[in-house]
Amino acid sequence: MKRKSDQKMTFDKLGRTPVLRDLVARAELHRQAEQQVLAAIPAELAGGVRFVSCTDGELVLTAETAGKASQIRFRQHEILEAVREIELFRFTWKLKVKVAPPRFREKPVRKKEPLSKENARLLKEEAGHTKDKALREVLEKLASHVRD
């Protein structure tokens, strides 16, 4: 059995696997291209935008919301002009924006607000006017959950 230190993949070992080395090099090139493109996009639009690809003069971006995608499309001439100043994208002539919502969005924690005294009083009052016995019991139980 190999030691743990021998099992770890290090960048020194990338020289032995040309496919992996090529993949890491392409990923690094993509990361650099994304940084350059996002720097060319106006700051108020850059958040939530990702660089997808640039092939045959067509620059493809994704936006988290349809509203942001529309804003990018509206300002596409300005964005393309800024992008063309980058050597890698000097022959870019078309901008395509797709909507790709984030996969996971953290849901805010809902905090239950305790019942106010005024609302508890109104529930008790309504319970007194109700003829249905089961509904009256439920309303009175709800009214008992008042905050102190």
Image: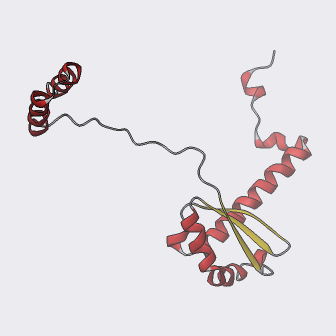
Q: Residue furthest front?
A: 131
**Up-down relation of residue 93 to residue 29 (above or below):** below
Asked which quadrant contains residue 39, the reply is: bottom right
Question: Which residue sits at x=40%, y=42%?
Answer: 108
48 or 33, which is in the foreground?
48
Question: Is 45 placed left or right of 24 in the picture?
Answer: left
Residue 112 image position (x, y, % from top left): 28, 35
Q: Is residue 135 visible?
A: yes
Question: Is 85 placed left or right of 132 in the picture?
Answer: right
Question: Which residue sits at x=70%, y=63%?
Answer: 32
Question: Which residue sits at x=78%, y=27%?
Answer: 6
- The quadrant in which the N terminus is found is top right
Asked which quadrant contains residue 5, the reply is: top right
11 or 51, which is in the foreground?
51
**Up-down relation of residue 2 to residue 81 (above or below):** above
Residue 115 image position (x, y, % from top left): 17, 34
Q: Residue furthest top?
A: 1
Question: Is 4 placed left or right of 116 in the picture?
Answer: right
Q: Is residue 146 visible?
A: no
Asked which quadrant contains residue 117, the reply is: top left
**Up-down relation of residue 136 to residue 77 (above or below):** above
Q: How many marks?
A: 0
Residue 63 image position (x, y, % from top left): 61, 62
What sort of colour scheme is used for the picture?
secondary structure
- The quadrant in which the C terminus is found is top left
Question: Is 37 placed left or right of 122 in the picture?
Answer: right
Residue 95 image position (x, y, % from top left): 72, 74
**Up-down relation of residue 87 to residue 101 (above or below):** below
